[in-house]
Amino acid sequence: MRALLLLAALCGCIFASVWPLQMQCYHCEETLLNNDCSAAKFIVNCTANIQDACQKEVMVGTHGVSYRKACASYTTCLIASAGYQPFCSPGRMGSVCISCCNTPLCNGPRPPRISKAHTCTPLSLMLLLALTVTMATLSAILL
């Protein structure tokens, strides 16, 4: 019984530490203002462990404001954002603003405010599972 519990605890710890957290972002190419592609049909799963952020570009052109949204590497997105900083003048013709964020679906519409005390992220759930399995194993070993 102890060996089984120890094996379960070990598997739980390995599962929690290596299971990739897959980011979800909105994805579209140059959508005009009347549709900023924040509908459910534009949600995509990003490449696990590579695309760890969402990117949003807002461009002001002759036909109005358009959006480009996609999954991205957070570091690469920050570099692109910094490179376009001189061209970011919201509302001005020719403006290109790039923003980066690293929470699921953060490149879509602003979500309603939710108290942080009531939210659970996939990482916190996995850590809770690993802690529960570890505590059960330790109590079984000590008994």
Image (cartoon, rainbow, N blue to C red):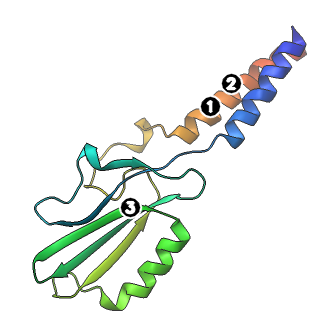
- Quadrant where the image shows the N terminus: top right
C-alpha distance separating marks 3 and 1: 30 Å
Q: Which residue is mark 2?
A: 132
What crowding class fits label 2: few (fewer than 14 Cα within 10 Å), some (14-19), or many (20 or more)? some
**Observer able to see residue 25:** yes
Label 2 sits on what residue type? Thr
Q: Which residue is mark 3?
A: 70
Residue 48's spot in the image, x, y percent? 57, 50
Residue 34: quadrant of the picture: bottom left
Label 3 sits on what residue type? Ala
Of marks 3 and 2, which one's residue comes earlier in the chain? Answer: 3
- Which numbered disc covers residue 69? none
Describe the element under mark 2 as helix, strand or loop.
helix
C-alpha distance separating marks 3 and 2: 36 Å
Q: Is residue 25 left or right of residue 140?
A: left
Q: Please, which residue is most extreme toward the bottom here?
A: 86
Q: Which residue is mark 1?
A: 128
What crowding class fits label 1: few (fewer than 14 Cα within 10 Å), some (14-19), or many (20 or more)? few
Label 1 sits on what residue type? Leu
